[in-house]
Amino acid sequence: MKMKLFIPFICTLLLSAAALPGLAQTKTITGKVYSTDGTPLPGVSVIIKGSAGKGTLTDAQGLYTLEATPDDVLVFSFIGLKSKEIVVGAGSTIDAPMEESLNELTEIVVTGTRSVGRTVLETPVPVDVIPIQDIMGELPQIDLGQMLATLAPSFNAVRSQGGDLDSHVDPAQLRNLAPNQTLVLVNGKRRHTSALLITSTAVGSPSTSVDLMTIPASAIEKVEILRDGAAAQYGSDAVAGVINIVLKKGTDKLTGSFTGGGYLNSGGDAGPLTRSGDPDGYNYQMTANYGFSLGTKGFINLSGEITQRRATLRPFVNDWEVYDASYLGNTRTDKNGNPIITNPELISAQASGNEALASSLLTQEGLMNARGLSWDDYAVYAGMPAITLGSLFYNSEYAIGPHTTFYTFGGMSYKFLEGYSCYFRRPAQTDRFNYLLYPNGFRPQMTSNTADFSNTVGIRSKTGLFNMDFSNTFGRNKMRIGMVNTFNASIGSNSPVEMNLGTHQFTQNSTNLDFSHNFKDIANGLNIAFGAEMRVENYKIMKGQDESFAFGDAGVLKITEDGYLVGPDGKPLQNEKGEPIVDANGDPLWVQRGDEIVVKNFASNCQCFAGFGPKNERDEYRTMLAAYVDAELDLTEDLLVAGATRVENYSDFGSVVTGKIAARYTVMKNLAVRASVSSGFRAPSLQELNYTHTATAFLPDANGVPQPVDNTTFPTNSTAARAIGIRELSEERSTSYGVGLTFQPTMGFELTVDAYQIDVRDRIFRTNTFNATEVGHNYEEVIGAGSEAQFFVNGANVRSKGIEMVGTYTTSLTGTSQISFSLAAILSKNEITRRKILDLDVDNLTDEELVEKYLNRQVMGQFETGTPRTKIIGSVNYRIGKLSTMARGTYFGKVTELSIDDDGAGNYWDQTFSAQTIFDLSFNYDLSPNIKLSIGGNNILDTYPDIMRVENRGFYLYSNNQQGSSGAYYYGRIMFNF
């Protein structure tokens, strides 16, 4: 209801504001743009500064015409030419001579170099610059992670559509390596990660990740993606590369947008296996950005964003047993042996003498029909979760002296998420069923409430020869995990149906002191940088409510007098499976007064996801100290050599030293080659070191129906780990190699090609589960009766290698139209070069079985072939007058998923999913200088991935490792600037 009132209010506000520019006095401005030798320049962009979309292009004779006010500033720009700004003033004719400038071929970057004034094509390593503020209005995607995934082929943000908490953060990754092997910066400062440990990622290993959704895209000027190992420059995690988010600095301009969209929900080609329905996943987003000038000395730029996204549902309609014979026949009993009537319809039919109806009610279909239910109601729901998100960011600088600037930036966000991450609990699952609460079963839903806060304060100044930057960055991510539509079966009918499962919190504080100076008289310039960092981290797990992790007494019978364990009918009591409880001779058990007998072994804990209890609580700290030296030497105008070394000391595992060497050589004016080699590392996160939890996994039985099994992940410093010889985690170490070229054959055309190889030693994976029977020597006393244990281990050495290509071309077709083409691709290969197997202390597993337990083929397959090895993105942008359009195609290569299950004859249930291509399209029109409309869609042809083979259909019906199974998405957007 609130959203229904909110939308018309915003539309009224925007339409009213659209009339304001008419109050300003405008006039027609004409002019000519030409080169320094007098040649007319066609296709030059002429815009009014601070008014996105208000402008024109020069024609074939270099002429232009547009409306402006005397106070407006005209900005003339084109690739390869030095931009120029001219105040309109009193005149009506403004000519603009423009000079060539190699620096204008691409943007100046700060990521991957501590020197100033280098462009993308001048750096010794590959850097992508994505101008978010200029293009976000034309993209179907509304959050940063998904925007980057459609623009940069080396970047992925696989959006999970289930899997407990895995869908609550979209992990960001580069070069098909794990999310925690990519470092994220904001304005060059390290960003804290989410508190959540994602236990299953697209590359098969557990990982933390920065939650990019907590950073509003409206606050971002551009994103720089460094595609090279950079641990020697930035420290831990920069194994695959670095993502630097640069915040806006603009002032005196209000910009914003309102977006609405939704998914078609056609169901794809699954037919009766799924259920198509009305469009779903509706989302609404309001963004705003405004900057205030602080006199002539500074600014403060504010950004806000509100997003509401409803869930998408992609059901898997199956024929798994819903009602078993005991339910249909009313033969279930409570712990005292009293009957439980689960099929009252049958009793009524029998009492009325309707034998046909009674016979029908003894079947699943008959009882479902009588209750107005169908197989659709028991489907497994995969899909994107519902999200409500609000965020506020700021960026500010103020000059407090001629050489000293105070700066600060940061933000806060709140995200509520509710997802369908759980299997439907069917009445046939007798150990987790309660007729009074859920007579037809139930579908639990996971929720999370995430509060995120960050703040950086710093001073940039000069100390002698050196530029100095002193800063402190604080960040905290706090996630409260909950469950609705659930219960604790062992507590019974008194169990709450909504539960607080616990809270995770990660806090990080970094203090940095950096110095740099460019010695222009040494060769062609030597830039020296050095500095130090101190970082403190804290990870907490706080327990949930008692009912979420407790074992209750709903199935426990307290014996009040000696005798046999029988019910009112004199027959032995039955357990939760309906089996009589008897001794070895088949006779009723003899019990004594005071005994407590578990008659019904009902499942403990909150259903779907057990709460975090006292044994899971953690409050762990660590500190890190680091120092680095970084140098870039222009030996000649054509040759650049760079190097860096860094030493870091961690309080929990010791010291590491990393280094890097890179070079760039200009072969000719428009062609350069570059290369780099570096060593790196990644410290295991506090989450990986300390996470512990019991979860319910579903494994197929003999009939292929998933059945629940409780698995506990234990930390490596636990008794459960040490009892079988699991070692504590150590850091991952890496060696990266890169070689590439940059080429500019003509004005407006840029091409970069880079090859890379990254070798990672001691990559962290999660083992398969170990049970007490396999381990032996009373292991059940350590991990608990009926439970299974798994661990995070340094499981393998891995390698990722590939070739990346980025090409762009921009030209003018006529005096008022411009067209640009881009093609970007990554061709990659992941492989596990060595499985690191320990000599574990287990009694009943062969060496071959132990190897599979430590690092099984399913995890190996997920890393090596479970994500596309090839990703190609091609786009065309065309603008003529007030109309512009964007068309983009994305190709995802084939993927192969390996299984640990087979047909009994050694034929594994592996599956290769065919390559997929999807298309995005948008149309944009300037209604006025201040109002712009955009409509379009993502995956407009509604392409779904291949359906999983029948043996592998559990939670998912479709593969989730290419474009996902959301299908076509269409949107409309209104943008404003004043």
Image: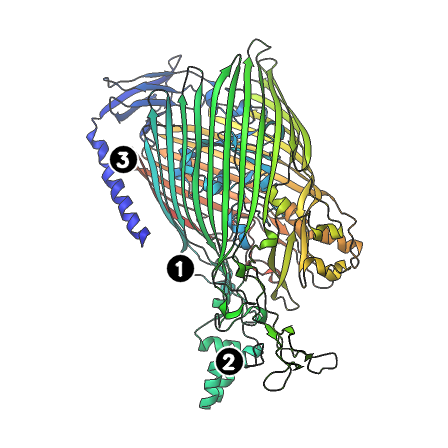
| SS type, badge 2 | loop
Quarter that holds the N terminus: bottom left
The residue singled out by tag 1 in the image is 278
Q: Amino acid at mark 1?
A: Asp
Q: CA distance from mark 1 to mark 3?
A: 35 Å
Give the number of the mark in front: 3 or 2. 2
Q: Nearer the viewer, residue 874 or 597?
A: 597
| SS type, badge 1 | loop
Residue 463, numbered label: none
Crowding around mark 1 (Cα neighbors within 10 Å: few <14, some 14 to 19, many 20+) is few
The mark that comes first in sequence, 3 or 2, is 2
Answer whether labels 1 and 3 touch (C-beta < 8 Å).
no
Residue 131 visible in the current orientation: no
Relative to 377, is 294 on the left or the right? left
The image shows residue 194 at horizontal and vertical percentages of 53, 43
Tell me the quarter of the picture where residue 741 sits. top right
The residue singled out by tag 3 in the image is 928
| SS type, badge 3 | loop
Q: CA distance from mark 3 to mark 2?
A: 69 Å
The mark that comes first in sequence, 1 or 2, is 1
Q: Amino acid at mark 2?
A: Ile
- Image point 48% across, 75% down: which residue? 368
The residue singled out by tag 2 in the image is 341
Question: In this picture, is 378 found above or below 565?
Answer: above
Q: Amino acid at mark 3?
A: Ser
